[in-house]
Image: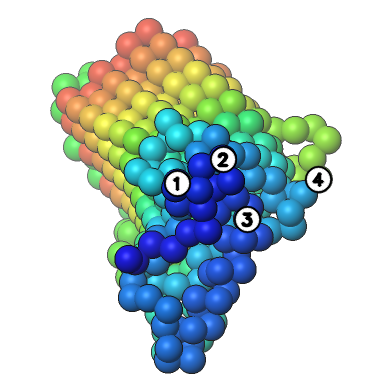
Amino acid sequence: KRAYSIGCSSDPSIPGFETLKELFDFSVLEFQAVQSGQPIREPPYIYFLCPDTIYKPDEEGYYILPLLDETYYFCGSDGSSKNNCIIDGGFTQAQITPSHVEGYVKHITGFFGIMFQGSNFVSIRAESSNEEMTSFSDCHWTGNTGFATAWSLYAPPPTPSPTSSPTNATVNSVDTVTNGTDRSRFLFNENDIISMSLVFTDCTFSNSYYNESSEFPDFYGIVNVRGKLILDGCDVYNNSGRTSIASENGHTRIFRSTVRNNTNYEETISSTLGKTDIIDSQILNNKGKHTIYMKEEEFSMTRSEIIDNYVTRSSVYVVGGNASIVETSFERTNFEEQAYL
């Protein structure tokens, strides 16, 4: 009773919207009904995409734009990527914005089983506040170019006034880490988080790259600015550009995930003026100046592996802040410095 559909032409018994325009039009209808105080249905607001369907934002002139709190998008009736719902091309494929109605707050949005491919700017533009979280489960990105695959940005970061302090490091079971530089130090504060949270579970990010014909000077994989980013059980592989996972003034958590076979002209994973936790993960076969680059950061790496990476400068480079590397192995890395803190 809570899900609305118009039915797929291939099988009307399967709930789903066949075009992004149909999806958008009904989203606006529901939004206006809620705004008028006469909602069509109670939340959650569940929308189904049709199985074995390719959606074309460029051709339709529409992308996914959640308007109501507790909005969820399912590929097919069960939200599985096996149902083959593909959003192909487009400047943007989904955009998350704060509510434009005073007093109405969006808290959560979810995507299940959707494939995003071929975006030429940013596939996922997450531009809401820290009151909102968007989760992606069993979603997959491939062949994106432009600026980034996913971008969380709400406001420009502040400029802290750092004080001179040596790096504080706790190192366990790793004898290849060197501690000791006197650099400016910034202590991360959760209150600095003003952007929204992005949570990716069992997702993949692959074969996205910097296109030399693009109007943008760099390509990033996932960008988190002053928000929270969680990768849980994800696989980031075969991408090329500046950085695969980048964060600034945010909190990034990489858990049970693999980052492999990426080629970056800067770092595979980088973060500045924030907090990064890497837990039970593998960083394998990546190329770049640094595998991991942390500046003025609260950084921890636990029960993880850094294996077979090619770096021109260092495997793990941490300047300022606090670092804890526990039960983490470094193996077969082509490096100038294994780890420099």
For label 3, count other residues whose C-alpha is less than 10 Å away and answer few (under 14), some (14-19) or many (20+).
Answer: many
Q: CA distance from mark 1 to mark 4?
A: 41 Å
**Label 2 to label 4: alpha-carbon separation:** 39 Å
Q: Give the residue pinned by disc 3.
A: 20
**Which quarter of the rendering shows the N terminus?**
bottom left
* Residue 20, horizontal then vertical, whole percent: 63, 55
**Which amino acid, mark 3?**
Leu
Q: Nearer the viewer, mark 4 or mark 3?
A: 3
Q: Is residue 282 left or right of residue 314?
A: left
Q: CA distance from mark 1 to mark 3?
A: 17 Å
Task: Tell me the amino acid under the disc marked 1.
Answer: Ile
Secondary structure of residue under mark 1: loop
Above/below status of 216 relative to 236: below
Q: Are marks 1 and 2 in contact (CB under 8 Å)?
A: yes
Left or right: residue 135 versus residue 52 is left
- Residue matched to label 4: 215
Residue designated by label 2 = 10
* Mark 3 secondary-structure assignment: helix
Residue at the image point whose x is 69% and y is 42% from the top = 89
- Is residue 149 visible in the rendered image? The answer is no
Q: Please tell me which of labels 4 and 3 falls first in the chain.
A: 3
Question: Quick one: label 2, few (<14), some, or many (20+) residues within 10 Å?
Answer: few
Marks 4/3: CA–CA distance: 26 Å
Q: Which residue is mark 1?
A: 14
**Residue 192, located in which quarter of the rendered image?**
bottom left
Q: Give coordinates of residue 149: x percent, y percent.
A: 57, 43
